[in-house]
Image (cartoon, helix red, strand yellow):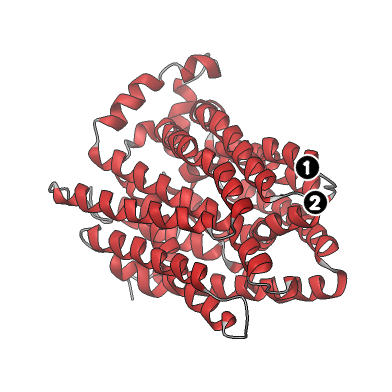
């Protein structure tokens, strides 16, 4: 019991506790409405290609802010950067999505939403810099699970869609997202303090501009390239992001438009996905993350492959499609949960603590550079056939298995518990 996630949750302290305990508000705000953004855009007249283009623009914006996130996080502090850029990255876009009418609203929101590239860095530093290294994997499990608590209100989403139709219902969700995100920002800022490394970096960066601090990236890139563990973790995280981006963008579309599942039923699949994620993260995945990570990674990629393959093969006719969708989600849920946590945990285990902010900035930028084209590519493929984005995912998943086998075949034995 002392090694369980429940025990970890109860004994959290300081900034880690503040970040984890406020994370349910993320699940009840942005994670409640973002799964419906694609079908919301479709309902407002956008086609698949334009939806994919907007996803790509958002990622390009994230690349810019990811590049600046290390210097910004070091210059103004982890705590302040998280608060300021959560407002820019989520609160302001929520208001734009709430009142969106056409392509240009979504394009503006995507560009502004890209500023969350800063909080992806600063919040991670705030979360784990004062934590024990051996707890990092479990901490990421907890934050991922708490982010899935949107399932609690998914039935309300279904009622809203059935009573009001899709567009008014999703507008209400984005307004709710704005309100709860503001509450999360206030509570986290009040309950946290600057990390010890953050205080040191604040002193070291006094009198230096953001641009001056950005000039030190060549040293950081060399540090990353010298570590096989960091390079491998970035590759795994990039593959996970690409697959997740395609799946999150086009899953609702294929289920609603190809398999002809009514919009009012879609929230119940999100309930199932969230419940699965929480179950896997608390009871299954932690047991697989002990020792060498080769088998968990191969299992994760393989499970995701089976889920995506099943989704493509499901017939649109007949009631059989509903249990088959649920089965595909079981495999997707395990694969996604394991890959997401492994990608985050690996880099934070291998990272140099004194350069964490800049290393995470470069890492996130590399991931976004790799992922950015796939939103647009997925949109073009989806315009041809709703199956094709998921065929693309299948090929990426096979590549992930091959890369994992090659890496561990060379004698690398890094685990989730040790460097």
Residue 11, visible in the rendered structure: no
Q: Image point 59% across, 81% down: which residue?
A: 322
* Residue highlighted by disc 2: 45
Q: How many marks?
A: 2
Q: Earlier in the sequence, mark 2 or mark 1?
A: 2
Residue 159, given in percent of the width and then of the height, sits at: 79, 76
Residue 103's tag is 1
Name the residue nearer the viewer: 318 or 11: 318
Bin the neighbour count of mark 1 within 10 Å (Cα to Cα): few under 14, some 14-19, many 20 and up: some
Against 345, residue 138 (above or below) is below
Q: Quadrant of residue 24?
A: bottom right
Q: Secondary structure at mark 2?
A: loop
Front-lying residue, 125 or 319: 319
* Left or right relative to 165: residue 88: left
Residue 55: x percent and y percent? Answer: 62, 44
Of all residues, the one furthest to the front in this rendering is 384
List x then y, in percent, for residue 123.
53, 44
**Residue 160, x across and y down, in percent:** 81, 71
Q: Residue at x 63, y 57 (%)?
A: 26
Relative to 412, 128 lies left or right: right
Q: Are marks 2 and 1 in contact (CB under 8 Å)?
A: yes
């Amino acid at each position: 019991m002392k090694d369980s996630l429940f025990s970890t949750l109860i004994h959290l302290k300081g900034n880690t506790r503040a970040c984890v305990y406020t994370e349910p508000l993320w699940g009840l705000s942005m994670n409640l409405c973002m799964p419906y953004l694609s079908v919301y855009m479709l309902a407002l007249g956008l086609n698949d290609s334009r939806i994919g283009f907007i996803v790509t623009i958002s990622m390009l914006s994230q690349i810019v802010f990811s590049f600046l996130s290390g210097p910004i996080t070091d210059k103004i502090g982890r705590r302040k950067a998280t608060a300021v850029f959560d407002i820019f990255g989520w609160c302001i876009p929520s208001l734009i999505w709430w009142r969106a009418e056409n392509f240009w609203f979504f394009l503006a929101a995507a560009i502004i939403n890209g500023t969350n590239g800063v909080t992806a860095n600063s919040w991670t530093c705030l979360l784990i810099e004062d934590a024990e290294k051996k707890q990092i994997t479990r901490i990421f499990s907890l934050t991922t699970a708490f982010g899935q608590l949107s399932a609690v209100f998914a039935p309300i989403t279904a009622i809203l869609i059935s009573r009001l139709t899709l567009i008014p219902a999703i507008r209400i969700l984005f307004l709710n997202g704005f309100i709860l995100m503001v509450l999360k920002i206030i509570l986290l800022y009040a309950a946290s303090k600057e990390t010890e490394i953050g205080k040191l970096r604040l002193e070291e960066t006094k009198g230096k501009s953001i641009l001056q601090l950005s000039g030190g990236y060549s040293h950081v890139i060399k540090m990353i390239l010298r570590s096989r563990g960091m390079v491998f973790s970035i590759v795994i995280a990039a593959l996970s992001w690409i697959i997740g981006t395609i799946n999150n963008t086009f899953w609702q579309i294929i289920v609603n438009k190809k398999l002809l599942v009514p919009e009012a039923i879609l929230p119940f699949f999100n309930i199932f996905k969230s419940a699965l994620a929480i179950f896997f993260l608390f009871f299954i995945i932690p047991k697989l993350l002990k020792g060498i990570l080769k088998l968990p990674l191969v299992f994760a990629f393989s499970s995701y492959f089976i889920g995506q393959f099943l989704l493509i093969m499901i017939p649109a006719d007949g009631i059989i499609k509903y249990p088959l969708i649920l089965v595909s989600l079981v495999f997707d849920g395990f694969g996604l949960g394991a890959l997401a946590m492994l990608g985050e945990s690996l880099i934070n285990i291998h990272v140099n603590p004194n350069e964490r902010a800049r290393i995470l900035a470069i890492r996130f930028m590399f991931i976004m550079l790799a992922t950015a084209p796939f939103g647009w590519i997925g949109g073009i493929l989806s315009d041809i056939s709703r199956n094709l984005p998921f065929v693309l995912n299948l090929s990426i998943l096979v590549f992930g298995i091959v890369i994992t086998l090659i890496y561990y075949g060379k004698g690398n034995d890094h685990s989730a518990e040790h460097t």
